[in-house]
Image (cartoon, coloured by chain):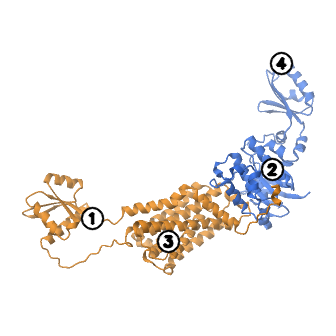
Chain colours: A blue, B orange
Amino acid sequence: MEVAIQCRNLRKTYDQKVEAVRGVDLTIYAGECFGLLGPNGAGKTTTIEILEGLLTPTSGEVEVLGRNWQTHERELREQLGISLQETRLSERLSVRETVELFASFYRYPNSVESVLEELSLGEKADAWVGKLSGGQKQRLAVATALVANPKVLFLDEPTTGLDPQSRRQLWDIIRQFQERKGTVLLTTHYMDEAERLCDRLAIIDHGQIIAEGTPAELIARLTGHHVVEFAISGMTDGSDDQVWKRLPGVQGVRTDDGLLCLQVNEPHETIPALLAEVCKQGARLEHLTTRQASLEDVFVQLTGRHLREE
Amino acid sequence: MADTAQQARRTNGRWAGYWHLLLARMKELQREPEVIFWVFGFPLLLALGLGIAFRDKPADIASVVIVEGPNSQKLVALLRQSPEHGAIRADVLGERTTLDQFRLGKYALVVSMDDQGVHYRYDPARPESVLARSQVDDALQSAAGRKNPINTVATAASEPGARYIDFLIPGLIGMNLMNSGMWGIGFATVDMRQRKLLKRLIATPMRRSDFLLALMSSRLVLMVIEVALLLGFGALVFHLRVEGSLLAILLIGTLGAVSFGAIGLLTACRAQKIESVSGLINLVMMPMWIFSGVFFSYERFPEMVQPAIRALPLTALNDALRAIILQGAPLSSQFARIGVLALWGVLCFVLALRWFRWS
């Protein structure tokens, strides 16, 4: 497979003390959608901005489309579409004027009208940017990247702060780009986004990659593919996790937001035993759900923290 | 976009980015009513206000009051006979009212006459009172037959070219070029940096020089309008006479706009927040508002600071503009001032480029 982006032993230290990125290796293949998943401050943005050639790494090597930033910056810029986190475009330009401006920087840009159409911005083409909703602004940011007619699309937290409908709209846009053989690198701290959108992803924490693979692979690596969550009251035996750990099929126990979470492989064996135990203790079951393990569980197992926590 | 292959592919030439940047900048400016006001409206209002306040009134008429009495008609008659009777307006009132009105400031001088002669009651602290006394005295003396030992001829110098408004308009043009250069470049740059737009722009193949060039070009377009507006306003409303060539004025205006653009760029080269750059811009402009002879001549400042004042870019710009507009001086005679302006511009531009931060 053709490699689109590659970096080796990437490090970035700010002011000689803050280590934002501590030895990141990545290989992203042409045509895939690759996600960098991690909590705020994990080093996602620093990593993606180094790959975009906007930051110089303290050490390490970067290759994009077989070129490097020192020698082929202009050539690379022509082939990349980039959307940064929180760019505020000029409010008093219209949507079309903004996309035309960005199109004018590229030698062979896409047609402005077709990009507007694809991102469902056709109706808003003559509206001022200042009048757009959050979702429309975010789509416009992606439009300024797509009008480049890029081979690689970089998106830094493209859906942060968007409502569910706008997020799904953006996911469709990203998939369409991928269908045209485009390569996508995105960062996110949304689990579901990474799970649904990314072919492969790397979980990044404290400037290091702590796991990498397809979403299915990462979840399969978990001990316990199902999660049983429950809450009880009137427990005589205290809240000793050991009681639950002894139940059949339980791989791990943790408390999460007032709920007890059991990681299990076979819920049909664990749940009857759980109910019997609750009865035996003379306690009352307040809540019981069971679900497939998610990337969130992967992250919690790897780090002991939740992704959304600071 | 699946059909883009069939579409005629658009290819952008070398200057497409520059033109679109310039176009976008002009549209943005045009859509900001505040900018239109501060760049175009405010200087005109300033010119209008100051022009009216300091317009050349007909010579002040002295209002004097004559105390009613046996000799009051004689006094009135004497004043009427005098060659200066047009400059004096005399009323005749009773003694009590006279003094009241004098105290209230309606009259500048109280005149009365008895056997010992003419009495003046005046207030030495009020200039018009002092003036009225000597005017009335002159009028009475010459009406009574005094001969002046020396013949004098006085000419009033209130023709276009020597009035306050003539001094003011070139100064306002200079000040406006400074204001809009500093704000138009400095503030706009930091605003775009704070919005991360600069960073977004350099993530494209846009040439950084095109960006700076477009920013400067937008200033030049505005400069032509600013200069034309103020000169036209001065000519129409105050009959300002433009002595020098318009080309020379525009060339100096271009140099001024570019130099102050460069100073604005240097001021803004690292600031991250518009609040901090606003302070810096005011700090840079403040001394020039005061010292560079916008509203009054800087000759009033002590001799020892004159070289420093003349080294300020706004002083050079104002002096050159005044020389060309008011005296019709050729461009070649402004060599030193052009040098000062250009030096500031080049120096600031080089430093700004070295220190400039795009993110």
**Mark 2 and mark 4: Cα distance apart in space:** 53 Å
x, y (%) of residue B260?
55, 67
Tell me the amino acid under the disc marked 3.
Leu
Q: Is residue B306 left or right of residue A153?
A: left
Among numbered discs 2 and 4, the one appearing first in the sequence: 2
* Front label number (4 vs 1): 1
Does residue A73 sit above or below A224 in this rendering?
A: below
Q: Is residue B3 left or right of residue B114?
A: right
Q: Chain of mark 1?
A: B
Q: Are marks 3 and 4 on the same chain?
A: no
x, y (%) of residue A207?
79, 51
Q: Residues within 10 Å of mark 2 (few under 14, many from 20)?
A: many
x, y (%) of residue B214?
64, 66
Tell me the amino acid under the disc marked 1.
Asp
**Mark 2 and mark 1: Cα distance apart in space:** 80 Å
Disc number placed over residue B334 in the picture, else none? none
Residue bearing mark 4 = A282
Q: Are marks 3 and 1 on the same chain?
A: yes
Q: Is residue A20 left or right of residue A212?
A: left
Q: Chain of mark 4?
A: A
Along the viewing direction, whichever of A245 and B340 lies nearer the viewer: B340
Residue bearing mark 3 = B317
Of the 4 image quadrants, the one containing the C terminus of chain A is top right
Residue bearing mark 2 = A174
**Mark 3 and mark 1: Cα distance apart in space:** 35 Å
Among numbered discs 3 and 1, the one appearing first in the sequence: 1
Q: Are marks 2 and 4 on the same chain?
A: yes
Of the 4 image quadrants, the one containing the N terminus of chain A is bottom right
Q: Are marks 3 and 2 on the same chain?
A: no
* Front label number (3 vs 1): 1
